[in-house]
Amino acid sequence: MFNDSDFQAFDDPTLGGRMAGIRSEIDPKFDALAPLVIETLGFQTPIYAHVAKHLRRHKNPPMNTWIAFSTNKRGYKMNPHIMVGFWDDRLFVWLASLAEAKERAQMIQRLSRLLPELAKLNDHYDVSPNHMAKTFSPISARKLDKQLTRYQQVKQADFLVGRQWLRGDAIFADPTQVEREVLATVTDLRPFFNQLIQ
């Protein structure tokens, strides 16, 4: 699955070069990962995989790339989803409800009910208010509460909970271990995802 050389796609500063690296090195691995994640989720509700296409980019190269899993066949941004992806310096797995979420008030209510259990996730987990920035904090009951309040009050805020592995981490020497950790994270996030899509 993923290894440290996958980050090299982001070393190219040009749009064409970076996109070529993403398309040739990372996207095929996303495609291979998709059925494993869907099987790990094991929901009765169909789950669809969406690989980021970056179609609107005509000048600036993408800062990150990902595959998202949602119940919507056409897209994912308006629905709660799990996303697995890369920045130039990290691999991430997030359970996400974005600013674009439809029925946002309902999502906030559901997240509010989930906060006590989310706070029990181990200290490998982080929270983030923005899926397009590297901003994050280690998970805690206080950080979750603060993040949910921000999600409720700030129109452009996202709500993300998940894990990250930094470029150069020893885990990337063993792609099988990376796969295990990614799927274990999906397993941990599965009950929360299931509650959000009900």
Image (tube, helix red, strand yellow):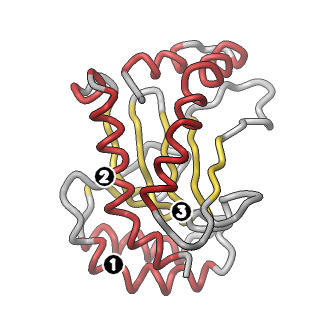
From the image, which quarter does the C terminus lie in?
A: bottom right
Quickly name the residue at label 3. Answer: 158
Residue 172 percent coordinates (x, y) = 30, 25
Amino acid type assigned to the residue bearing label 1 in the image: Leu
Side of 43 where 183 appears, left or right: left
168 or 70, nearer to the observer = 70
Badge 1, how many Cα within 10 Å: few under 14, some, many 20+?
some
| Disc 3 residue type (three-letter) | Asp
Q: How far is mark 2 from mark 1, CA to CA?
A: 20 Å
Task: Describe the element under mark 3 as helix, strand or loop.
Answer: loop
Q: Nearer the viewer, residue 45 or 14?
A: 45
Left-right relation of 58 to 50: right
Q: Which residue is mark 1?
A: 115
> Which x, y percent locates residue 138?
26, 55
Tag 2: amino acid: Ala
- In which quadrant of the rendered view does residue 65 lie? top right
24 vs 109, left or right, is right
Disc 2 secondary structure class: helix
Question: Label 3 vs label 2: CA separation?
Answer: 23 Å
Mark 3: few/some/many CA within 10 Å (<14, 14-19, 20+): many
- Tag 2 or tag 3, which sits nearer the N-term? 3
Q: CA distance from mark 1 to mark 3?
A: 15 Å
Q: Looking at the picture, how far across and down is residue 56, in whole percent?
A: 80, 37
- Give yes or no for contact between labels 1 and 3 (Cβ–Cβ under 8 Å): no
In the rendered view, would you say 27 is above or below 44? Answer: above
The residue identified by callout 2 is 184
Q: Secondary structure at mark 1?
A: helix
**Callout 2: few (<14), some (14-19), or many (20+) C-alpha neighbours within 10 Å?**
some
Which of the marked residues, 2 or 1, is nearer the chain's N terminus? 1
Q: Residue at x 67, y 22 (%)?
A: 19
Quick check: marks 3 and 2 in contact, CB under 8 Å? no
